[in-house]
Every structure is written in structure tokens, then in C-alpha cells.
Amino acid sequence: MLAYERFGSGEPLVLVHGISHRRQAWYPVAERLAEHREVILFDLPGHGESPDLPSDGRPVKDVLQEHLIDFFAELDLEQPHIAGNSLGGRIALEAAADGLVSSATALAPAGFWKNDLDFAYIRAHFAVLLAAAQLSSPVAAHLARSHHGRRLMLSSLMVHGHRLDAERVLGDLNSMLAARDALRRIIKGGVPFEGEIHADIPVTIAWGDKDRVLLPYQAGRARRQLPDAEHIWLDGSGHVPMSDDVDRVVDVLLQGSSQGLRSITAHVA
């Protein structure tokens, strides 16, 4: 069973964090969302407090999607809304392509790089990020106590990392180190997004214009591949915009999940 939290009231909205992160990534926006939606946060396999990511030879995309389907079944979720960041955004789009959800909102979703060279940059970025986390671990508690230290530690992921408290920053750092095996396996199995999403499933894609991980040009590729989606720029936000612009991200998630729940029979028909 994946580790999760469930709170709030209204139509269910499942939030999926990014690679090497944890469900707490959504805390800056979760309480505001819970005023309008039943919010479900969970840790992906190999991340946070969830069990390890299985290593059984299957494509990692299929493994993650199978876990999502099982998670929906365990929580009795039928066609919930879904939103995700980075890898979580990719998972949200795959869920929409498979007809599992009523809407999908993706914040800087993975899968829209141009070629192998571009993907090599992404791999290198996470390798450097992981190495920096390992090297800084002995002094992380000291760095996290200061405004400038927190900004430095999180500078490749967000513009305003200093807004997070020291406990949260240290928790994220430790979670990244603990998730390193899952990170390496997911990166190794990375493939472009090629799904087709049925026109009756609303899709929103939002990208921070300061993203240093999945560079903003990828928003243009997402627009060309999914022309029927709503495409939004998050001005002044980095790769993890939930901490950079709470108000804007809350608005995007609520608007993206505003068209009601679909019925399974309607989709099958």
C-alpha cells in the first residue's frame, strides 16, 4: 500500500509528486485546495514512505501506471481528477490517455524533450542534484537554517526555495537520498510521451518560465503534441511551482479540475 493522506471535501483530486520528491511537495497548496476538493496525496513507489519500486524487468512506465490503478482501486476512486508535477505530470497525462481520470493537470510534465541529447541534459541534471545532496548532507542542517542557504540548496528546482522551512528542506533532502535507486531506474527507463488523450478529458499543462530541469522550450513541444489542452505559463516559477507561486498554482489546479466527474460508462460508450 502506498503511503498517502486524504482530506478535504468535494470531488477527489489526486496529486502526484515528481521524481525523487515526496507527497509533502504539495503541502504549500494542499490546504487551499482542500477547501474545494477532496485532496489525495501519496508517495510514489520508491519515494517517501512508500515501498520500493519493483524491479521485475517491465518498463518503469507500466509499473508506475499499474501502481496508480491499484491505488485508485484501494481508495475506491472512480475517475478522479489528477494533477502532477514533473514525473507526476507525466503520470497524470498517461492516466488521461488511458481514460482513468476525469481531468488531468500537469505542471512541467516529463516526456517532451526533443532528442537523446536533450534527455542527456536531464539525466546529468539529476546526477548533479543527487551528488550535491550527498556532498552537502553533513552541513545541510546548518545551511537550511538560513534564508540564503535554503535558496542555494533548492535553486535548481525552484526560484523561492527560501520560503520553505528548514525542517521541510531537510526532509526533502533526505527523501531524495533515500529515493536514489528509484530515481536512477526511472531515469534509465525514460521515454517520450506519445499518448493520445480523448477529447472529452480536459487537460491543462502549465510550465514555469524559470524551469531549469525541463527547460521551458518543452512547453512548445507539449503544445504541438496536445493542441486541445489548455496551455499556461507560470511567470517567475521554477520546476516545482507549488512553492514558487501558491496562488497561481491553486487557481490552475482548481480550474483544471472544474468540469465535474465523468462516468466510466460514458467513456466506454
Image (tube, rainbow, N blue to C red):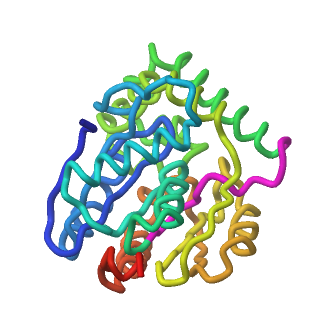
46 vs 206, left or right, is left
Residue appearing at x 58%, y 77% in the figure: 232
Q: Could you say which quadrant of the image residue 236 lies in?
A: bottom right
Magenta stretch containing residue 22, yes or no?
Answer: no
Residue appearing at x 34%, y 54% in the figure: 26
188 vs 90, left or right, is right
Instruction: Give residue 167's position: percent from left, percent from top.
Output: 29, 34
Q: Which residues are magenta?
A: 104-117
Q: How many numbered circles are shown? A: 0
Q: Residue furthest top?
A: 138
Residue appearing at x 56%, y 70% in the figure: 205
> Closest to the observer: 150 or 15?
15
Instruction: Give residue 256's position: percent from left, percent from top.
Output: 42, 78
> Closest to the observer: 39 or 188?
188
154 vs 16, left or right, is right
For residue 268, above or below residue 128: below
> Closest to the observer: 32 or 48?
48
Q: Quadrant of the C terminus?
A: bottom left
Instruction: Give residue 63's position: percent from left, percent from top.
Output: 48, 38
For residue 103, above or below residue 129: below
Q: Residue furthest front?
A: 269
For residue 165, above or below residue 10: above
Magenta stretch containing residue 105, yes or no?
Answer: yes
Q: Quadrant of the N terminus?
A: top left
Residue appearing at x 17%, y 54% in the figure: 6
